[in-house]
Amino acid sequence: MAGEIPDLHAQERTGTGKGAARAARRNGMVPGIVFGGDVDPLPINIPFNVLLKRLKAGRFKSTLFNLKVDGHEDVRVICRDVQRDVVKDLPTHFDLMRLRRTTKINLFLPVEFINEEDCPALKKGGVLTVIRNEIEVIVTAGDIPESIVVDLSSLENIGDNISISQVALPEGAKPTITDRDFAICNVAAPSALASDKDEDEDETEADEVPTVGEDGEAEGGEATEGDAES
């Protein structure tokens, strides 16, 4: 994982159950639980404003944290779930899982597109269409990358795409989907160009349709075998 593992400070929560959780929320805290690692679950609280800031910063559920709780040894954790209020969409509870450096976990990593200015297909007027802005991969807990980098300079023509097999994944990472070579992005024709092409096709089809006269016979077309005999 690039950079230093960030600290996540929490307080041990006394008491368990809905009553203790409600009391924590009344005091401006968000209750949570730390599980895994062959030890008992640890109920904790994190200040509401601290957790909300972390969530708004993004990548909270794909970041490895060094959890610090007074009276307990530091432990590496990753968020497995954040429950939210169905009306206000604010965090009401969270789950953290203890990890070892060698633990394999599934994560959704954001896709970072680079060299857009050097992409030949875009220079020709194409428009980048992002099919996947994040990809689920299996990674080692001690080496979680910040993102999956996709180099757009390899796209030569409008209509080209980049699939997962063309991307250099971070060392130790592999996609969870292995049965197909799924696309990540492509370069489409501009909407105006696509519209002009459709109109040209419609006009061509209209030219090929013969005009029918009042007597029900085609006008302006080649004479039929019956016309020639008459």
Image (cartoon, rainbow, N blue to C red):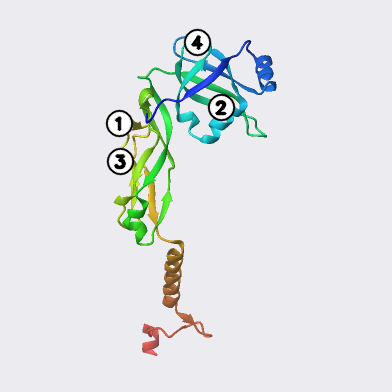
The amino acid on which the numbered mark 3 sits, given as a three-letter code, is Ser
Is residue 142 shown left or right of residue 21? Answer: left
Q: Determine which residue is flagged by label 3.
A: 165
Q: Mark 1 to mark 3: distance in Å?
A: 14 Å
Q: Mark 3 to mark 4: distance in Å?
A: 44 Å
Q: Nearer the viewer, residue 131 or 145?
A: 145
Q: Earlier in the sequence, mark 1 or mark 2?
A: 2
Residue for point 34% across, 39% down: 180
Q: Mark 4 to mark 2: distance in Å?
A: 23 Å
Q: Determine which residue is flagged by label 2.
A: 82
Q: Determine which residue is flagged by label 1.
A: 171
Residue for point 45% across, 79% down: 210
Q: Earlier in the sequence, mark 3 or mark 4?
A: 4
Q: Position of residue 226 (x, y in %)?
A: 39, 84
Q: Position of residue 198 (x, y in %)?
A: 44, 67
Q: Are marks 1 and 2 in contact (CB under 8 Å)?
A: no
The amino acid on which the numbered mark 4 sits, given as a three-letter code, is His
Q: Earlier in the sequence, mark 3 or mark 2?
A: 2
Q: Position of residue 16 (x, y in %)?
A: 62, 12
Q: Determine which residue is flagged by label 4.
A: 72
10 Å neighbourhood of mark 3: few (<14), some, or many (≥20)? some
> Which callout, 4 or 2, points to the residue nearer the camera?
4
Q: Earlier in the sequence, mark 1 or mark 3?
A: 3
Considering the numbered disc 3 on the image, is that residue within a helix, a strand or a loop? helix
